[in-house]
Amino acid sequence: MKTVVITGCGRGLGLEFVRQLLARGDRVYAGARRPESSGELMELAQAHPDLLTVLPLDVTNAAHRANLAATLNGKGVDLLINNAGVYGPVPDTFGSTDEDAWLETFRINTVAPRQVAETLLPNLRTGTRPCIALLSSKMGSIADNGSGGVYIYRSSKAALNAVGMSMARDLADQGILTLILHPGWVLTDMGGPNAEITVTESVTSMLRTLDKASDADNGRFIDIDGSTIPW
């Protein structure tokens, strides 16, 4: 049994992570900005009262992050899945910069994952083979950008990749792995109706990657098929 903390669990990938981890018997702490608005998450909490703790968690809110640490009460964390994120404004084309939206997207997608990891560092240090998973996107790959546009989302994920690489370097001597994951183009509210894979397929593949992660994977930018994505 692993102890897992997941952010952004109200819907989509976060909710599916909760489902699959509960199904295999892991202990899950699931954060969502408004958990009471997610009927599916609350149903899971009622069905698994001994395995699932749901709590309000806006990842940009320092008080919410402190409450997460207090709820854990010193318990070791084996896996932290930094899933919470936003796409930003659409359309996002050259000449239409929304500076406030850009900065808010960075706060959620880039800054908050490190702040959550910092908050839970004492818990990760006492976990079993502890790992931090950062959900990035292939759209954050500079080498893979063949179409341009989407400045805000692309730049926030490229910056998250840089954060992840530094965390991998800084935390390695404490036995903590950091993996940077591309979930694929997923059929979610963010991914849209033309996406290629379901949330179930995406989460199944990512958990497979996390389950077999080793020191050699520390700091890797990993595609849904397990291959390495160019920066």
Image (cartoon, rainbow, N blue to C red):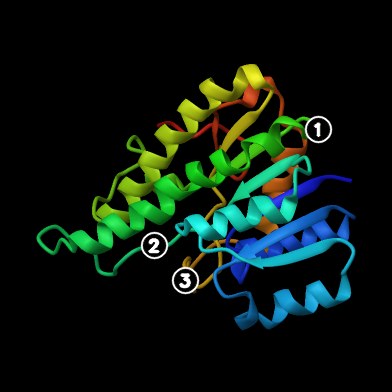
Above or below residue 216? Residue 46 is: below
Q: Which three-letter amino acid code belongs to the residue tagged 1? A: Thr
For this orientation, the residue located farthest to the left is 95
* Residue designated by label 2: 87
What residue sits 52% from the left and 59% below the top?
63
Q: Nearer the viewer, mark 1 or mark 2?
A: 1
What residue sits 58% from the left and 24% below the top?
171
Q: Quadrant of residue 20?
A: bottom right
Helix, strand or loop status at disc 2? loop
Above or below residue 65? Residue 162 is: above
Q: Which three-letter amino acid code belongs to the residue tagged 2? A: Tyr
* Residue designated by label 3: 192
Q: Nearer the viewer, mark 2 or mark 3?
A: 2
Q: Position of residue 134 (x, y in %)?
A: 55, 43
Q: Quadrant of residue 35?
A: bottom right
Q: Nearer the viewer, mark 3 or mark 1?
A: 1
Question: Along the line of sight, which residue is nearer the eye, 58 or 74?
Answer: 74
Above or below residue 186? Residue 46 is: below
Q: Could you tell which of marks 2 and 3 lies nearer the N-terminus?
A: 2
What residue sits 75% from the left and 49% below the top?
73
Q: Is residue 150 visible?
A: no
Q: Could you tell which of marks 1 and 2 lies nearer the N-terminus?
A: 2
* Residue designated by label 1: 128
Q: Is residue 184 visible?
A: yes
Q: Mark 2 and mark 1 in contact (Cβ < 8 Å)? A: no
Q: Could you tell which of marks 3 and 1 lies nearer the N-terminus?
A: 1
Distance in Å between CA atoms under marks 1 and 2: 33 Å
Above or below residue 23? Residue 141 is: above
Label 3 neighbourhood size at 10 Å, few (<14), some (14-19), many (20+)? few
Q: Position of residue 55 (x, y in %)?
A: 67, 66
Q: Position of residue 141 (x, y in %)?
A: 38, 39
Q: Which three-letter amino acid code belongs to the residue tagged 3? A: Gly
